Amino acid sequence: MINRIKKAEEIVADAQEKASDIIKKVIEQEGDYYKSSNFSGLVSPIHYFDKDGQLSSSWKGYSKKKSEANSIKYYLNKQLESSGFGWIRLSDIPKGQQSINLHKIYFPEAGGSGNDPIVLGKPFYGEPGSVCSQTYLLVGYDPDRHNFTKEQCENIITYMKTRFFRYMVSIKKNTQHNPAVVFQFVPLQDWSHVWTDEELYKKYSLSKEQIEYIESLIKPMDSEALFNSDDLLDPNFGEFNLLEHGVKIGDKILYNNEIEVTVCEDNKVEYAGEQYTLAQFTSKFMPRNKHSKSGVIQGPKYFSYNGVSLYQLKESFLGGQK
């Protein structure tokens, strides 16, 4: 046990040293400006539009169809509405109305743990005339300080999807939540063009070893699942029906006792605004060095419900067959 603790401490110390070296390179490039102005200043406070339950993640007072009265697009929890949006009145919005007509970016308020290979939920463009529920945060919310164009928003989105950006977030982030403070180490950029990891690595003079380190931790955000062939799904476990085993829609289950996801269908979960089967989620979020030699995905093996492995539940259901 002592050796395990010592090993863990060494891993943490090594990660902190590597992060410190990368931050130093960013400071060298950005100067004192970086210390006082960084990406955290673009991120809205939580509960930006919602108040006292109005526009909360479970609020259902929206319309499914746009009308003269319900003319404001409302991005909401996909568990409530599969399309991800509805329509509301101006009077439904208790605060933050100054941001309605801005070009902006939305991203999930909860998503990623800081230790997983994705870090954040996917950002997406928020057009003028739109707001969001408590489910999301905004980038570019202040009409006096931000006031971006659509093109600038799209360029910010490409930046947020880079491995470099998400690594810099992971240095500060240690829960599923994404308050502005977790973006403290992320430098601002010129939003007039698209950013790539290659450009960012070059701009901050990152060494080959530093680049390899970042890319060993952070996966491309838009990559497909590592395993796409049906041949890689265990025939007994590939279509695990959560509802048949006492799990209900809306319940929370844990992946590797670390990442909390929400059951949204009999065989799917939602995380950071995206839906996955258990096998799809496992193939996307499991570190490459932990895949089985066969590559076969037994998604339920890595999830638990009320402290019990779904794999154990399935084995019981199958009478012990694998």
Image (tube, helix red, strand yellow):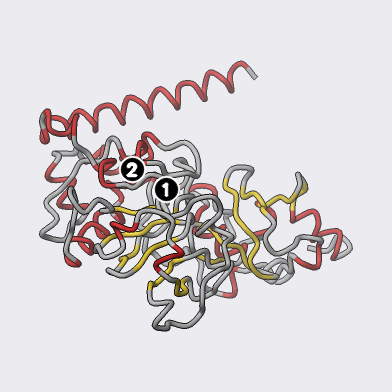
Residue drawn at x 54%, y 48% as measured from the top left: 290
Residue drawn at x 34%, y 64% as measured from the top left: 124
Image location (x, y in percent) of residue 176 = 50, 44
Q: Amino acid at mark 2?
A: Tyr
Image location (x, y in percent) of residue 273 = 48, 62
Q: Is residue 121 above or below residue 276?
A: above
Near-viewer residue (205 or 93): 93
Image location (x, y in percent) of residue 287 = 49, 49
Residue placed under numbered mark 1 in the picture: 119
Can you tell which mark lies on residue 167? 2
Q: Amino acid at mark 1?
A: Val
Image location (x, y in percent) of residue 58 = 59, 60
> How far is disc 1 from disc 2 in space, using C-alphas?
8 Å
Q: Is residue 232 above or below residue 156?
A: below
Of labels 1 and 2, earlier in sequence is 1
Circles 1, 2 touching at the beta carbon (< 8 Å): yes
Can you tell which mark lies on residue 163? none
Q: In the displayed structure, does residue 29 sit left or right of residue 279?
A: left
**Dot 1: element:** loop
Query: Which residue is most to the right?
Result: 319
Query: Which residue is most to the top?
Result: 2
| Quarter assignment of residue 313 | bottom right
